Amino acid sequence: MRTAFLIITIALIGGCRPDDAVIDLAGSGYPNKPGRIILSSCAVSGCHNELSKEAAAGLSLSTWDHLFEGGRSGPCVIPYRPDFSTLCYYVNTDKTLGVTLQPSMPLNMPALSKEDYLVLRDWIASGAPNRDGVVKFSDDPYRKKYYVSNLLCDEVTVFDAATRLPMRYVSVGSGLSAKYAGVIKVAPDGQYWYVSFLAGNLIKKFRCSDDAFVGSISLGAGSYHSFTITPDSKKAFCLDYALPGKIVYVDLQSMSVSATYTNGGNFFYPRGAAVNASSTVLYVGAQFGNYIYKIDISNPQSPVISEKQIDGTATSIYNSYLDPYEIMFTPDGSKYFVTCQYSSQVRVMQTSNDSLLAVLPMPYYPQQMSISSSTNYLFVSCPADTLSFPGKRGSVAVVDYTTNTLVTKLYAGWEPYGIGLDEEAKLLVVSNMNINTGGPGPHHVTNCGGRNGYASFVDLNTLTVSPKKIELANVPYSVAIRK
């Protein structure tokens, strides 16, 4: 639909007119070779210049700075990644060289030559620098960022928080040892980010300042769906969801395994974890049943493991009943919340004695949580909800955690899963998987194929969803925020 609208609108105003192009390389900021191609073929009357951009997807290519402002679907160039840059998709007519999209650009003009296409592709692969050699978003090592893992592409999208635009794509997979990028977390001190994989045996570490790979920790065979990092950013607990389950305690500084907890082979589908502020207690979800694991880690080499029922009873059930999934503390640590998939609830527990305080009905199959200390809201993603918004799939439930009441439900996108909070900007970042074919048709494909999902944004003050959404790659999954 968007493509059709673009074609019709540009046709009505006469299409691109190269004779109107003004070649001001010095003023544009582009290097000479890519600049001449873009200014003579793209940033021309009726197309991607300042006067015509609203009829051309909101994208202006008149200058290097305008290029990185992006259009209505997000950026068209990702530095170092022509394989994720839609500028390459639209000007490429040779499928052996990469993804091609219609309508071919420049519109109603001869296609770019192979040589011109390769100039643009190679320029982007080198970072798409300006004429002074500056690569966009490389100037601030303390930049606030949002991270989204793309499950079926093994890529992590890095957003510049100030513009809410993707600034980098980072390849994180390593064949069979690290496949299906799952949970991503930024350490509390903001120095490093980590990603686990649903298949493989690694957790990987990257530096936040430049998103460079630092190293891997081998965890042993398993399916490491989730992990949690201690408040001092030095340790992590990685959960093996495969039977028999285990918890691997790792030192994030030395990049080594410190201990492996097996519970005598009696960890049943551990999934979702939280550590208290003093790093003395670890709570872990148990995928089936009515209980969670409470682990005294005062001495992490000799953990004391117990089961805590979350239904007010004193007996553990080992089949589908509540099915606790994720766990999250309130900012003051006095309560913790547990999403329960099977019963479609959030259970509110008192930290001091692990007693049940409240049961909050949720839309179907609640998953991830994120908590805001500035608004007193707990957000819960429910990707399989088909009842709250007829004809749509998925919702985000909003809970006032001071009163334990459901405030509202939001439609933030099709099949929302990962959620993360930017407290300073008062913004909730949502990754929408968009797996089900009933969802919105992707604007384009990527080099890793499949069906693209997207990111959306919720204003915490008004609880309204921004009309702007940013298309990502195949199955956007987990969200992490660098504060």
Image: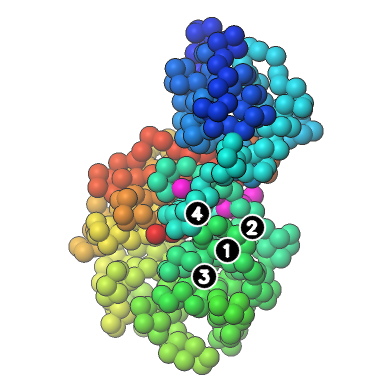
Q: Is residue 445 visible?
A: yes
The mark nearer the N terminus, 2 or 1, is: 2
User: Marks 2 and 1: CB-CB under 8 Å?
Assistant: yes
Residue on which the image places disc 3: 227
The CA span between labels 2 and 1 is 9 Å
Instruction: From the top left corner, tell me how far across and down residue 17 is, in percent.
Output: 58, 10
User: What's under tag 2, amino acid-wise?
Assistant: Val
Give the crowd class for mark 1: few <14, some 14-19, many >=20 residues within 10 Å: many
Residue on which the image places disc 4: 147
User: What's under tag 3, amino acid-wise?
Assistant: Phe
User: Marks 4 and 2: CB-CB under 8 Å?
Assistant: no
Q: Is residue 294 left or right of residue 201?
A: left
The CA span between labels 2 and 3 is 17 Å
The CA span between labels 4 and 2 is 12 Å
Q: Residue furthest left?
A: 403
Q: Residue furthest right?
A: 96
Magenta stretch secondary structure, dominant: strand
Instruction: From the top left corner, tell me how far across and down residue 216 is, in percent.
Output: 65, 70
Residue on which the image places disc 1: 206
Q: Which span is picked out in magenta?
A: 151-160
